[in-house]
Image: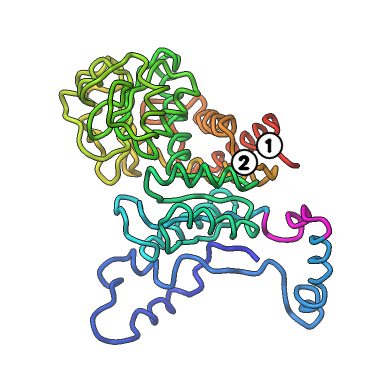
Amino acid sequence: MAAEIVNPRSDSENRDASEQGGGAAPLESFDPAFALHRGGKMAVQATVPVRDKDDLSLAYTPGVAKVCSAIAEQPELVHDYTWKSSVVAVVTDGTAVLGLGDIGPEASLPVMEGKAILFKQFGGVDAVPLALNCTDVDEIVETVVRLAPSFGGVNLEDISAPRCFEIERRLQERLDIPVFHDDQHGTAVVTLAALRNAARLSGRPLGDLRAVISGAGAAGVAIAKMLVEAGIGDVAVADRKGVVSRDREDLTPIKAELASFTNKAGISGTLESALAGADVFIGVSGGTVPEPAVASMAEGAFVFAMANPTPEVHPEVAAKYAAVVATGRSDFPNQINNVLAFPGIFAGALQVRASRITEGMKLAAAEALASVVGDDLAADYVIPSPFDERVAPAVTAAVAAAARAEGVARR
C-alpha cells in the first residue's frame, strides 16, 4: 500500500462534517486553511485489488507466507516485495516547528502531513509522518532505530538544535539507510544552488566571494559546511552574541567546530560589522538587519534573507543595494524552498538503495538544481519554481549518479 495525496472526502462531505456538532461556528468558517486540513491531508490507499477470495489469498494468507519466508531467507528481498524501498519516515519531536517553536508532537502533525504530501507530489516518494512523544536524544534514537526496518529512509524534521545534530549523527552511525535532517541539508542545498547561479550571473566564481550567515542553528551550520565544501572564498557565521570565531570562550561544541573551518579572515564583533564589504548575506535566524549594514556590503552583493514570514531584510530594502535578492517566501522572486531539494534527494537515494546520503550527493543535488535555470538566468530567476517539472527528475538523477560514484549505492 502507499500513502497517497488524496482527500478521502468530497467537498460536500467536508461541508457536512463541518456543520455537524452544533455550538460555535467551526474554525473553517473563519479560515479556509482549517477546511483544507479537516480530517487530515493524507489517506492510505492499497496498490493491489482485493476483490474476491483469490485476491485475498494472495494479498494475505496463505500467499503472503511465501513472501515472508523468502525474505526471512534472503533479507534483501524486502526491497522488492514490500514498500520499504520507496517509503520515508518523516520524524519529529515537535520542538522546532516552523516559526512556532516547541509546540509538541500533536501540534506538529499538520506540518509532518504536509511534508509527506510534498514528498509524494514532487518526488513520487511515499512518506509516513511520525510525531514522537519524547525529546530525549537517547529515546528518539532508540525509537527510530526500532522503527527503521519498515522504511527506506528517515527524514528528520523540526527537531531543535543542538540536539538535532547528535540525533542525526547517531542514527547515521546505526542505520544502513539514508538519514537526512532537512532543516539542515535541504536548506543548504537550495541555498548553494541559488548562490551558484547568482555568482554565474555576476561572472564571479564562488572562490571570490565572502559570505556572512546570520544564525548558527541547524540551517546556518549546514549552509556554512556546504559553502566551504563548494569552495566559497570565506564564510563567517554570527549568532546572538556576534561572529563565531576561534577566540570566543562561550562556544558550544558545535559552534567550536564551526569556528574551526569558517571565518578564515578572523572577523570578530557584530553581524553588522561583519557585513561591511561582504559579498553575500544569508539569513536563517529571524531578527532584523539594519539598512545601513546592508548598504555597507560590497557592490553587486547578494542578499538571501530567508526567515519566514518576515525576512531579516525586506526585499524592497535589499533591492536598493543588492544585485540578487532571495527570500523564503513565495510572494517574492527567488524563493529558497526546501521542497526543491528533499523529494529529489530521497528519490535518487531510494532509486539506488543508497546506504546513506553523502556530501557528494548533496553537492550534486545543488548543481543539478542550479542547472535547471539554464539560459533563463536573471536577477529575479536564480532558482527554479517548486512547480517546475524538471526539478525533481534532475535532482533525482544527479543524486543517484553521485551515490553510485561514491560507492554507497546497492543497485
Residue 398, above or below 169 = above
Quadrant in the rendering for residue 207: top left
- Where is residue 371? Give x, y as percent: 54, 28
Which mark is drawn over residue 356?
2
Quadrant in the picture for the C terminus: top right
Q: CA distance from mark 2 to mark 1?
A: 7 Å
According to the image, label 1 marks what residue?
A: 408
**Residue 51 x, y percent position in the rendering:** 74, 79
The image shows residue 35 at horizontal and vertical percentages of: 36, 69
Residue at image point 37% right, 15% down = 264
Q: Which residues are magenta?
A: 73-84
Along the horizontal axis of the image, is 309 left or right of 346?
left
| Residue in the foreground of this view, choosing between 311 and 131 | 131
The spot of residue 136 in percent (x, y) is: 42, 55
Residue density around tag 2, few if under 14, some if 14–19, many if 20 or more, within 10 Å:
many
Residue 201 vs residue 34: left or right? right
Quarter holding the N terminus? bottom right
Q: Are marks 2 and 1 in contact (CB under 8 Å)?
A: yes
Hey, which residue is sitting farthest front in the picture? 249
Neighbor class of circle 1 (other Cα within 10 Å; few <14, some 14-19, many 20+) is: many
Residue 109 appears in which quarter of the rendering?
bottom left
Indicate the secondary structure of the residue bearing disc 1: loop
Q: Residue at x 50, y 66 (%)?
A: 42
